[in-house]
Image: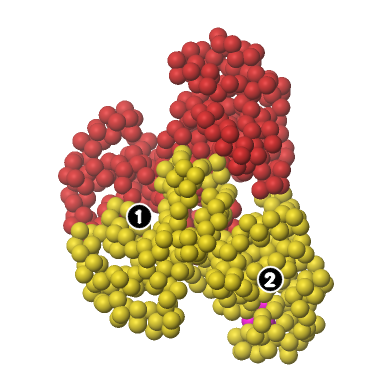
Chain colours: A red, B yellow
């Protein structure tokens, strides 16, 4: 059995999902992959820190987190107000998991957290797109220089494989274009508009359901999708695009009539985000587009995500799956951790 | 640069595709993965054997193969009539590629070829489904016992990732069901029937285009899909199903009226092949089914393949891509080889 010592920064929805999976699926991971996870510490800027060298108990931890109690007040081994570098220096982690809320302009707090981990030679997995979108090359180089591995499958399409799909199973394919539906909130709004709702009403409903935030700009103006385009440009084409370098149109200008007109011929309006290479040029784009019924992207409703990868030898390969969610995003992080661990142990 | 010594058994369409990729994409593989392929030997029961310890030239080899000339008459290094075990004993291969035509009843000639390779401790990649469908467990155990790796991505959906998708990027997911459109010929026929063609006429057209064989039984009665179900049962659930253990109905009973009736409500008739686990029971099935428009599988036309993987934490993940083709199948083999090589060198 391969014991894997894990630390977690960020105990919001995704972080709690990860703790939940470590608890509920531990025997599955053991039987199927020969891996046991020991959660050495959990730290959250709002909730404090819990640390136990022999591993925290997932169930008690969840009870505390869901009860909204402060971690350092609980008896999870050594309660601690230690800083992340201090925690890292004593925890002997195999992998640090970063699941803090992300700011796509500064990349923080992920940037600082990932840098701490990688510069200490500790491999890191993140679900947040800010830091990866801003400086993938810098973070990767830091990882390489310190013998660590950095993975970020969940930063795009939650746990639905895209980054690792191209990296592993599609190895050998030259990728020419990657585009699809990368923002569930806008896809939900556009889907609702097909039943005759106005943009305003559909947005209000998305807000009521918690899909859209009070200030919906990040989603409806295409910023969220644009950050994912920056990640894809770097990942698939080795090209850094700043977010302002992505041609971007949101869905605020899409009218009920546009949607209805498309529907009449079996087509649908979708917010398409993509990146493509033409010669040496790499360009990223986000904008509403009419998608014909014969395109698999036309079958995507609600908060589901889908991406078509256009390659030299396979033509189009499309992957469809969840684009958000607690366990969905946490599962992407588990996949990254397992791949790091099994790669390091060469027993995959 | 990691030099990878490769041998190839079978110079039909797929084998030639592999030689073509080794030739045309060698600088791409070098730059992107740091891997160079040296094709040490090529052997085909009908065409003879070419062997060169320093590596065969892909371009001259293709010219000969496409000219229909006998390999051993050409000056590709040491012309040889050697048996496969003899070739293996001198070739010092990293990976053997098997791309011979497959017989799903006997698994031959793949079974014998793969056993020779694995028992000599040489990792193997195959595109043919016969041997893998018949005795995956036996072959894997032989591989393990000899320190070799066996991979077979192209045996289902050609190079479209399914096996390696679940193995790598979906690691940690518990798979509950895998089903989809796994036979391009029948999907082509059903697609044609939607434009009002009878089954007979659609089959005749598929035969004229070379999609269906003169004796179409393997495709239209669902045997081809059923072998893939056997592979999936073993791969995803560790359960050996003999082909007769798959509930199987072909498309010969599907009428133009069935297809038209489904079309009227936006649905489509598809030949669905799948495997699912219920408790300890694993069951495999192939049969025509009505698929509603909201299901991504309904958007699949012609010879394209698509599979939906139902999991515990991600719900449904669907992958769509080519189901056959020279370079498409060869690409799946290249992906397998790269993954073996990079895994062995721990630098993925």
Q: Do the residues labelled 1 and 2 touch (CB within 8 Å)?
A: no
Q: Residues within 10 Å of mark 2 (few under 14, many from 20)?
A: many
Residue B58 picture location, percent across and down: 67, 77
Pointer 1 chain: B
The local crowd at label 1, few if under 14, some if 14 to 19, many if 20 or more residues have their Cα within 10 Å, is many
Magenta range is B58-62
Question: Which quadrant would residue B185 be assigned to in this image?
Answer: bottom left
**Chain-order first, disc 1 or disc 2:** 2
Q: Any magenta on residue A19?
A: no
Q: Is residue B346 above or below residue A4?
A: below
User: Does dot 1 land on a helix, a strand or a loop?
Assistant: helix
Q: Which of B342 and B138 is in front in this view?
A: B138
How far apart are the alpha carbons under marks 1 and 2? Answer: 38 Å
Please name the residue that numbered disc 2 is placed on: B113
- Residue toward you, A187 or A214: A187
* Quadrant including the N terminus of chain B: bottom right
Regarding mark 2 in the picture, which secondary structure is present there? helix
1 vs 2, front mark: 2
| Residue annotated with mark 1 | B296
Whether residue B54 can be seen here: no
Residue B276 position, x and y percent, is: 45, 50
Residues marked 1 and 2, same chain:
yes
Residue A137, disc? none
């Amino acid at each position: 059995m391969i014991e894997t010592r894990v630390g977690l920064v960020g105990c919001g929805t995704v972080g709690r999902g990860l703790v939940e999976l470590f608890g509920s699926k531990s025997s599955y991971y053991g039987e199927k992959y020969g891996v046991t996870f020991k959660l050495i510490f959990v730290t959250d800027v709002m909730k404090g820190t819990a640390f136990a060298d022999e591993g925290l108990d997932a169930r008690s931890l969840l009870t505390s987190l869901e009860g909204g109690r402060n971690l350092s007040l609980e008896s999870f081994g050594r309660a601690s107000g230690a800083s992340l570098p201090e925690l890292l220096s004593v925890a002997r982690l195999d992998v640090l998991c970063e699941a803090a809320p992300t700011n796509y302009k500064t990349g923080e707090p992920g940037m600082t957290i990932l840098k701490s981990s990688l510069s200490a030679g500790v491999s890191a997995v993140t679900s947040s797109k800010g830091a990866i979108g801003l400086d993938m090359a810098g973070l990767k180089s830091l990882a390489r220089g310190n013998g660590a591995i950095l993975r970020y499958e969940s930063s795009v399409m939650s746990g639905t494989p895209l980054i690792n799909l191209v990296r592993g199973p599609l190895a050998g394919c030259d990728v020419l274009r990657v585009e699809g539906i990368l923002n569930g909130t806008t896809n939900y709004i556009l889907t609702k508009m097909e039943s005759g709702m106005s943009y305003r009403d559909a947005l209000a409903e998305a807000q009521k359901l918690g899909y859209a935030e009070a200030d919906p700009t990040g989603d409806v103006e295409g910023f969220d999708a644009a950050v994912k385009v920056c990640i894809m440009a770097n990942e698939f084409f080795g090209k850094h695009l700043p977010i302002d370098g992505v041609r971007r149109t949101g869905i605020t200008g899409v009218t009920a009539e546009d949607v209805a007109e498309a529907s009449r011929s079996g087509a649908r309006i979708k917010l398409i985000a993509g990146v493509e290479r033409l010669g040496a040029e790499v360009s990223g784009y986000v904008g509403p587009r009419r998608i014909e019924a014969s395109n698999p992207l036309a079958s995507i409703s609600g908060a589901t995500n889908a991406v078509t990868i256009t390659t030299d030898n396979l033509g189009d390969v499309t992957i469809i799956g969840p684009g958000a969610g607690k366990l969905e995003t946490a599962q992407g992080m588990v996949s990254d951790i397992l791949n790091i661990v099994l790669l390091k142990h060469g027993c995959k």
